[in-house]
Image: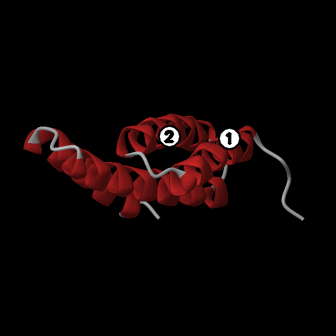
């Protein structure tokens, strides 16, 4: 059984926001839920004390950043912002 860690707590908080994103049909609300989940996943990554937590948080950061980039494209945000999120996602995926 895996011990409960601060990183795991932040991931769970992020997962709650991420599930709300999945259930939302409004693109602007999707953006808000993804930004919220991404902030929790950042904290999970920063507080990770072992490789398992670090890898899981990196995967979550990458997934949320990738989905956020796609939502930003739907909202017709600046290309540089979308590009930033895609690059961010790739960076986190490379840490998994």
Is the residue 61 above or below the residue 96 in the image?
Answer: above
Q: Return the residue nearer the eye: 84 or 5.
A: 84
> Which residue is at a point 55% across and 60% down the rendered structure image?
55
> Which residue is at a point 25% across and 45% down the rendered structure image?
72
Image x and y of residue 42, in percent: 50, 38
Apparent side of residue 79 relative to residue 93 in the rendered image (left or right): left
Q: Return the residue nearer the eye: 36 or 76.
A: 76
Q: Return the residue nearer the eye: 25 or 40.
A: 25
Image x and y of residue 84, in percent: 20, 44
Q: Is there CB contact under 8 Å for labels 2 and 1?
A: no
Instruction: Say if residue 57 shows up in the picture.
Output: no
The CA distance from mark 2 to mark 1 is 11 Å
| SS of the residue under disc 2 | helix
Is the residue 51 above or below the residue 28 in the image?
Answer: below
Is the residue 68 above or below the residue 35 in the image?
Answer: below
Label placed on residue 13: 1
């Amino acid at each position: 059984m895996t011990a409960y860690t601060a990183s795991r707590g932040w991931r769970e908080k992020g997962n709650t926001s991420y599930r709300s994103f999945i259930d939302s049909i409004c693109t602007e609300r999707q953006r808000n839920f993804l930004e919220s989940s991404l902030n929790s996943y950042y904290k999970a990554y920063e507080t990770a004390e072992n490789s398992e937590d670090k890898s899981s948080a990196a995967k979550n950061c990458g997934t949320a950043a990738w989905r956020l980039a796609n939502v930003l494209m739907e909202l017709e945000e600046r290309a540089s912002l979308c590009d930033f999120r895609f690059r961010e996602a790739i960076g986190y995926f490379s840490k998994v």
